[in-house]
Image (cartoon, grey):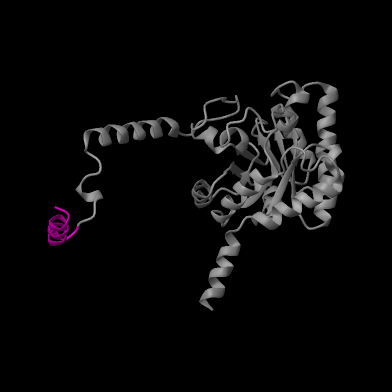
C-alpha cells in the first residue's frame, strides 16, 4: 500500500505532454531550461522546472563549436542519456541534430526512435515549419511526442545569414503564423518560437491550442526556455539580448578555483580535517623495515 502511494505521488509530480496541454488550458506558465549532464539536470529537476531540454546548443556550451551544425546523433544521445539519469519530474526533451531528420521521413522516424529508446527521454524536438510536418506526423503516429521549433532556427544559421530576429515583415509574419498552425496540425504537442517579435509571438500563442515556448519571443508565450549556462553566467562567448542573468556563477567558480590554487600553493589545503589517520605503530613498523 505504501509503495503504491509513493508511485502515485511520483506520477502526480511528473510533467508530461498532458500536463503541458493542461497548463495551456488553465493559463499556467511553463518553464524550460537546458541541461547536458547528470549533475546539472538533477539540480534543475529538483528546483521544479517543468521541462528540461537537451539542446543541440551543447555544441556551443559543452563542445566549443561556433554553432550547432557539427553536433551528431552520438553527441545528443550521450548527453541525453546522462541527463535522463538525473531527471525524475521534468518533461525531458532531446533535440534532433542537423541532418538527422531533413533527408526523409524514414530517416527522421528511425533517428527519433533511436533517441527515445537509447536515452529514455520523453520527447524529441526538431526545427522547421511546413517542410518538417511530414516528419512530425510520422513520429506522432508512431507514438513519439514532438516539440516543434520555428522562427530563428539555429541549424539554419547559414541560410539566415547569421543569428537574426525573424518574421518582421508582413509576409514573413504571415508565414510564421502558418508554420505554427501547420506543426500543430501535424501533431506537435508544443512549439518553441525563437527570436520572434513579442507582439507576433503573442498572436501566435492565442491562435494555437498547443503551448508556445518562447526564447527571445516575449512574455506573451505560454512558457519560456533559456540555456542554463547563459542565465547563470557560465557562458560568455556570446550573450543574446533575450538572456537575463539570474546569477554570475562563472565569477564565483573562478574565485573558488583561484582560492584552491592559492591554498594548495601555501599548504593550507588539504588541512587535517581533509586527511585520513593511521596508527603510529604502523608507521614506525614500515619506517623500520624500509630504513
Identify which residue, 226 or 101, lies in the foreground: 101
Res. 54 in view: yes
Residue 280 relative to residue 12: left or right = left
x%, y% of residue 162? 71, 22
Identify which residue, 149 or 84, lies in the foreground: 84
Residue 248 relative to residue 20: left or right = left
x%, y% of residue 44? 52, 47
Magenta span: predominant SS is helix
x%, y% of residue 177? 82, 34
Residue depicted at 71% across the width and 35% down the height: 193
Quadrant including the N terminus: bottom right
User: Relative to residue 57, is residue 165 depicted above or below?
Assistant: above
Q: Hey, which residue is sitting farthest bottom in the picture?
A: 1
Report the label total: 0
The range drawn in magenta is: 278-291
Identify which residue, 138 or 12, lies in the foreground: 138
User: Relative to residue 122, is residue 212 depicted above or below?
Assistant: above
Q: Residue 85's quadrant in the figure?
A: bottom right
User: Relative to residue 249, is residue 117 depicted above or below?
Assistant: below
User: In the rendered structure, does residue 265 fall within the stretch colored magenta?
Assistant: no
Q: Residue 151's quadrant in the figure?
A: top right
Q: Residue 117's quadrant in the figure?
A: bottom right
Identify which residue, 117 or 206, lies in the foreground: 117
x%, y% of residue 210? 75, 46
User: In the rendered structure, does residue 279 fall within the stretch colored magenta?
Assistant: yes
Residue depicted at 61% across the width and 48% down the height: 78
Residue 273 relative to residue 291: left or right = right
Residue depicted at 85% across the width and 51% down the height: 138
Res. 29 in view: no
Amino acid at each position: 500500500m505504501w509503495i503504491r502511494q509513493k508511485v502515485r505521488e511520483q506520477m502526480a509530480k511528473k510533467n508530461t505532454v498532458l500536463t503541458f496541454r493542461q497548463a495551456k488550458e488553465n493559463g499556467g506558465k511553463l518553464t524550460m531550461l537546458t541541461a547536458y549532464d547528470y549533475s546539472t539536470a538533477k539540480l534543475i529537476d529538483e528546483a521544479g522546472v517543468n521541462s528540461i531540454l537537451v539542446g543541440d546548443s551543447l555544441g556551443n556550451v559543452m563542445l566549443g563549436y561556433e554553432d550547432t551544425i557539427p553536433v551528431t546523433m552520438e553527441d545528443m544521445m550521450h548527453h541525453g542519456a546522462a541527463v535522463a539519469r538525473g531527471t525524475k519530474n521534468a518533461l525531458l526533451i532531446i533535440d534532433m541534430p542537423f541532418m538527422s531528420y531533413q533527408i526523409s521521413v524514414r530517416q527522421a522516424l528511425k533517428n527519433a526512435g533511436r533517441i527515445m529508446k537509447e536515452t529514455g527521454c520523453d520527447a524529441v524536438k526538431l526545427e522547421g515549419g511546413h517542410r518538417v510536418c511530414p516528419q512530425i506526423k510520422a513520429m506522432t503516429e508512431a507514438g513519439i511526442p514532438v516539440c516543434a521549433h520555428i522562427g530563428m532556427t539555429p541549424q539554419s544559421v547559414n541560410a539566415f545569414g547569421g543569428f537574426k530576429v525573424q518574421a518582421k515583415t508582413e509576409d514573413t509574419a504571415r508565414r510564421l503564423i502558418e508554420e505554427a498552425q501547420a506543426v500543430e496540425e501535424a501533431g506537435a504537442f508544443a512549439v518553441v518560437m525563437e527570436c520572434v517579435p513579442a507582439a507576433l509571438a503573442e498572436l501566435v500563442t492565442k491562435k494555437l491550442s498547443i503551448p508556445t515556448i518562447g526564447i527571445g519571443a516575449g512574455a506573451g508565450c505560454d512558457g519560456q526556455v533559456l540555456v542554463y549556462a547563459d542565465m547563470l553566467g557560465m557562458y560568455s562567448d556570446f550573450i543574446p539580448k533575450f538572456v537575463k542573468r539570474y546569477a554570475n556563477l562563472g565569477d564565483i567558480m573562478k574565485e573558488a578555483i583561484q582560492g584552491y590554487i592559492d591554498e594548495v600553493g601555501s599548504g593550507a589545503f588539504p588541512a587535517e580535517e581533509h586527511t585520513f589517520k593511521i596508527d603510529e605503530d604502523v608507521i614506525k613498523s614500515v619506517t623500520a623495515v624500509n630504513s
